[in-house]
Image: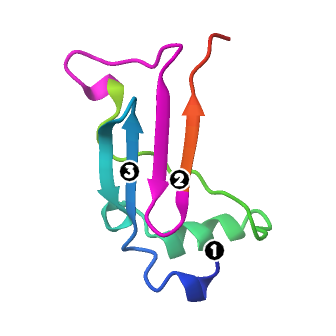
Amino acid sequence: MTADEVPDPQALRLWLKLNGEVMQDSSTADMIFGVAQIIADMSKYMTLRAGDVISTGTPSGVGMGQEPQRWLKAGDEMELGIDGFGTQNTAVVNG
């Protein structure tokens, strides 16, 4: 998305569902480093082009932090999204 389509990149809801259950629900407002800072820092070392994806980590709710710990297994289905951007679906398969 272009800057004019995202009025405030520090106010985007991020979420992830595992097999339909919400596991993560957060906002870019909770990031340690802001979106602008991440882009500025990365731009010092590489050329970013339209369509590039910057992976920044994940909000709370990861399986390792659960009691008991929860790990992905074949057959699991994940749906993740950023409000206003869209969603992505991933199926876990045996390697």
Q: What element carries label 1?
A: loop
Q: Is mark 3 on a helix, strand or loop?
A: strand
**In screen coordinates, is 12 left or right of 68?**
right
Magenta residues (range): 64-86
Q: In which quarter of the image is the C terminus?
A: top right
Locate residue 71: give its quadrant.
top left
Q: Residue 87 carries which label?
A: 2
Dot 1, how many residues are within 10 Å of its Cα: few (below 14), some (14-19), or many (20+)?
few
Give the amino acid type for the residue marked by disc 1 in the picture: Met
Between label 3 and label 2, give the one nearer the viewer: 2
**In screen coordinates, is 49 left or right of 32?**
right
**Where is 87 relative to 68, above or below?**
below
Q: Residue 1 carries which label?
A: 1
Gap in Å between the C-alphas at discs 3 and 1? 18 Å
Expressed as whole percent of the image width and height from the top left, the position of residue 31 reads 37, 60
**Mark closest to the chain's N terminus, 3 or 2:** 3
Farthest-out residue, front: 20
Gap in Å between the C-alphas at discs 1 and 2? 14 Å
**Mark closest to the chain's N terminus, 3 or 1:** 1
Between label 1 and label 2, give the one nearer the viewer: 2
Dot 2, how many residues are within 10 Å of its Cα: few (below 14), some (14-19), or many (20+)?
few
Give the amino acid type for the residue marked by disc 2 in the picture: Thr
Farthest-out residue, top: 94
Gap in Å between the C-alphas at discs 3 and 2? 9 Å
Q: Which mark is residue 15?
A: 3
Expressed as whole percent of the image width and height from the top left, the position of residue 76 reads 47, 22
Query: Do labels 3 and 1 touch, CB within 8 Å?
Result: no
